[in-house]
């Protein structure tokens, strides 16, 4: 059992911040995204802020393992010059990420199926039709929606064959412009996430219904972030793994207000890529 979060904040490199957790009311929360051009979001459920320590992961970056902690932090230069150009993302960035996920996970095949651009600036969000940073603790897929995403994306026969072997949903997150000094991403050590912390939440899109985990507060959660992430760095993390042999399966994460952010720091701009990683030997 880890020490209380506020005691950890006394360590060098840790900040104390309020992370927004879900409260389990017995009623399934709903998070609904409207159609293209409509950036409004409808969310139900109860949430509350809890003070938590978030430690500087840069001092320990070589310790982290994808199958142990649920994430790794890597140097990863990109040839993309404009992340607001969709053709550049699909033509250049997708292949970069496919190679990265293969290298970090050992997957035999990687399929990129989605990406999301985010900005902390409302005017940019409205102009570019992109999303806001998510300031609540969550994991993007659940025990049900992980396999369902494979069924959604592959032909029935291919999906059935793929689900007979191990697969994972792995995401890659990075800054797309200036170093991130506001609303950075905190990520929870997967070893400290308990099954009882996971609250299934309905995720509604214009064309389908999915499911995510909102996360209940647990003082044992150990949080890490990587201050001032640059566009030539990447955070690779798992949000689903079909293996149930003790390796990391879900990795909770959340944007948060960093109390050390300099006054006047520019809004965060970031991209996250979602991939299916298939393994032949497991």
Image (cartoon, grey):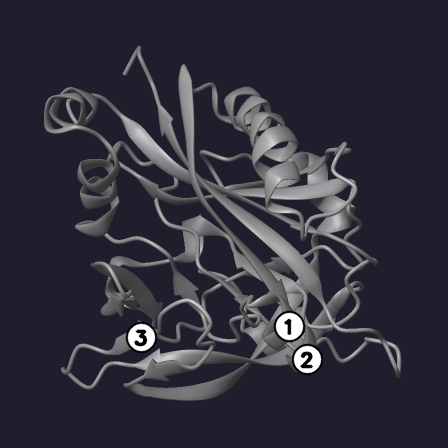
The residue at the point 83 percent across, 58 percent down is 178
Up-down relation of residue 231 to residue 269 (above or below): above
- In front here: 235 or 130? 130
Does the residue at mark 1 contact the one at mark 3 (Cβ under 8 Å)?
no
Q: Which mark is residue 42?
A: none
The residue at the point 35 percent across, 34 percent down is 168
Q: Position of residue 74 (x, y in %)?
A: 70, 36
Does the residue at mark 3 contact the one at mark 2 (Cβ under 8 Å)?
no
Residue to which mark 3 is pinned? 31
The residue at the point 80 percent across, 50 percent down is 230
Residue 64 in view: no
- Left or right side of 92 for 263: right
- Mark 3 lies on a secondary structure that is strand
Residue 139 in view: yes
- In front here: 9 or 161? 161
Q: Position of residue 221 (x, y in %)?
A: 47, 64
Q: Splitting the image into 4 quarters, where does residue 265 fall?
A: bottom right
Residue to which mark 2 is pinned? 123
Residue to which mark 1 is pinned? 127
- Left or right side of 162 for 230: right
> What distance separates the C-alpha of mark 3 from that of mark 2?
23 Å
Up-down relation of residue 206 to residue 98 (above or below): below
Q: Splitting the image into 4 quarters, where does residue 258 fall?
A: bottom right
Q: Position of residue 73 (x, y in %)?
A: 66, 41
- In front here: 250 or 54? 250
């Amino acid at each position: 059992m880890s020490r209380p979060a506020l005691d950890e904040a006394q360590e060098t490199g840790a900040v104390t911040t309020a992370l927004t957790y879900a409260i389990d009311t017995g009623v399934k929360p709903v998070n609904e995204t409207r159609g293209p051009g409509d950036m409004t979001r409808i969310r139900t459920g109860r949430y509350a802020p809890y003070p938590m320590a978030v430690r500087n992961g840069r001092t320990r970056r070589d310790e982290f393992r994808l199958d142990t902690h649920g994430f790794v932090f890597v140097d990863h230069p990109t040839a993309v010059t404009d992340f607001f150009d969709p053709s550049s993302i699909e033509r250049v960035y997708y292949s970069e990420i496919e190679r990265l996920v293969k290298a970090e996970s050992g997957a035999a095949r990687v399929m990129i199926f989605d990406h999301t651009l985010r900005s902390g600036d409302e005017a940019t969000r409205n102009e570019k039709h992109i999303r806001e940073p998510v300031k609540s603790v969550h994991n993007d897929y659940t025990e049900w929606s992980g396999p369902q995403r494979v069924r959604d994306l592959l032909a029935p026969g291919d999906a059935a064959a793929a689900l007979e072997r191990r697969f994972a949903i792995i995401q890659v997150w990075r800054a797309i412009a200036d170093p991130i000094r506001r609303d950075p991403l905190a990520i929870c050590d997967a070893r400290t996430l308990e099954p009882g912390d996971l609250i299934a939440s309905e995720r509604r899109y214009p064309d389908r219904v999915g499911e995510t985990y909102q996360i209940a507060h647990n003082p044992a959660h150990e949080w890490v972030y990587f201050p001032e992430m640059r566009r030539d760095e990447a955070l690779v993390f798992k949000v689903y793994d079909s293996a149930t042999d003790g390796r990391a399966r879900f990795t909770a994460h959340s944007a948060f207000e960093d109390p050390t952010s300099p006054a006047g720091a520019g809004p965060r701009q970031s991209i996250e890529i979602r991939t299916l990683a298939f393994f032949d030997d497991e």
